[in-house]
């Protein structure tokens, strides 16, 4: 993933704490290089516009998800949002290394309630809970919340 461009565009210090939860590779782009690319590369500007547009869409979707009263649907849609092909490109691997506690923090539910929701999603074939995370079997089902009429 890519982050921090807003801070560079506003010429201000980064205001958030970042902590890798898994082994990660990190590359830094110097400010001078960022600014040169911004001034001289149409392709880089298109990339930035696409990133910012995707993040705006993700932000709006997150607000919509927060308003859902059905916790199973909240978990489903939140999981689907983690598979954004622009913001988080992956190689056909639909395994998500995340704990139920971490997912609870993201969704705004307790670990216990997330566990119940994951069981419902697994029963409907949308996911499979595996050691250290989960395997997404049907991303469209998660996005659409089509895992049972009684759950919508």
Image (cartoon, grey):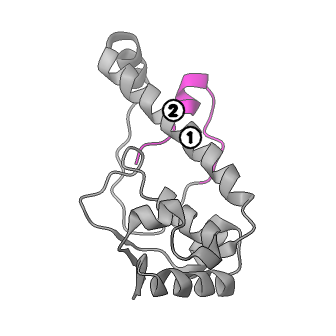
Could you tell me how far apart the alpha carbons at marks 2 and 1 are, in whole angstroms? 6 Å
Q: Nearer the viewer, residue 34 or 64?
A: 64
Q: Residue at x 33, y 11 (%)?
A: 40
Q: Specify whether residue 10 is painted magenta.
A: yes
Instruction: Name the residue carrying label 1.
Output: 57
Q: Specify whether residue 11 is painted magenta.
A: yes
Q: Nearer the viewer, residue 119 or 103?
A: 119
Q: Is the magenta stretch mostly helix, strand or loop?
A: loop
The quarter of the image holding the C terminus is: bottom right
Kindly indicate the quadrant of the structure image that contains residue 136.
bottom left
* For residue 120, above or below residue 37: below
Q: Position of residue 4 (x, y in %)?
A: 51, 38
Secondary structure, mark 2, is helix
Q: Where is residue 73 in the image (x, y as percent from the top left)?
A: 61, 69
Q: How crowded is mark 2: few (under 14 residues within 10 Å), some or many (20 or more)?
A: few
Secondary structure, mark 1, is helix
Q: Dots 2 and 1: beta carbons under 8 Å?
A: yes
Instruction: Name the residue carrying label 2.
Output: 53
Left or right placement of residue 151 versus residue 128 in this view: right
Kindly indicate the quadrant of the structure image that contains residue 11.
top right
Residue range corresponding to the magenta coloring: 1-17
Kindly indicate the quadrant of the structure image that contains residue 14.
top right
Q: Residue at x 43, y 75 (%)?
A: 126
* For residue 62, above or below residue 35: below
Q: Where is residue 27 in the image (x, y as percent from the top left)?
A: 34, 45
Q: How crowded is mark 1: few (under 14 residues within 10 Å), some or many (20 or more)?
A: few
Left or right placement of residue 8 versus residue 62 in this view: left
């Amino acid at each position: 993933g890519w982050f921090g461009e807003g801070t560079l565009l506003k010429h201000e210090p980064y205001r958030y704490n970042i902590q890798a939860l898994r082994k990660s590779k990190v590359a830094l782009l110097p400010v001078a290089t960022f600014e040169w690319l911004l001034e001289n590369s149409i392709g880089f500007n298109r990339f930035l516009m696409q990133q910012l547009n995707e993040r705006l869409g993700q932000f709006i979707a997150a607000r919509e998800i927060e308003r859902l009263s059905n916790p199973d649907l909240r978990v489903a849609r939140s999981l689907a949002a983690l598979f954004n092909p622009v913001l988080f490109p992956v190689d056909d691997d639909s395994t998500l290394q995340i704990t139920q506690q971490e997912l609870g923090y993201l969704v705004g539910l307790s670990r216990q309630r997330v566990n119940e929701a994951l069981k419902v999603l697994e029963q409907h074939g949308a996911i499979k809970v595996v050691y250290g995370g989960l395997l997404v079997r049907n991303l469209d089902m998660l996005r659409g919340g089509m895992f049972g009429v009684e759950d919508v």
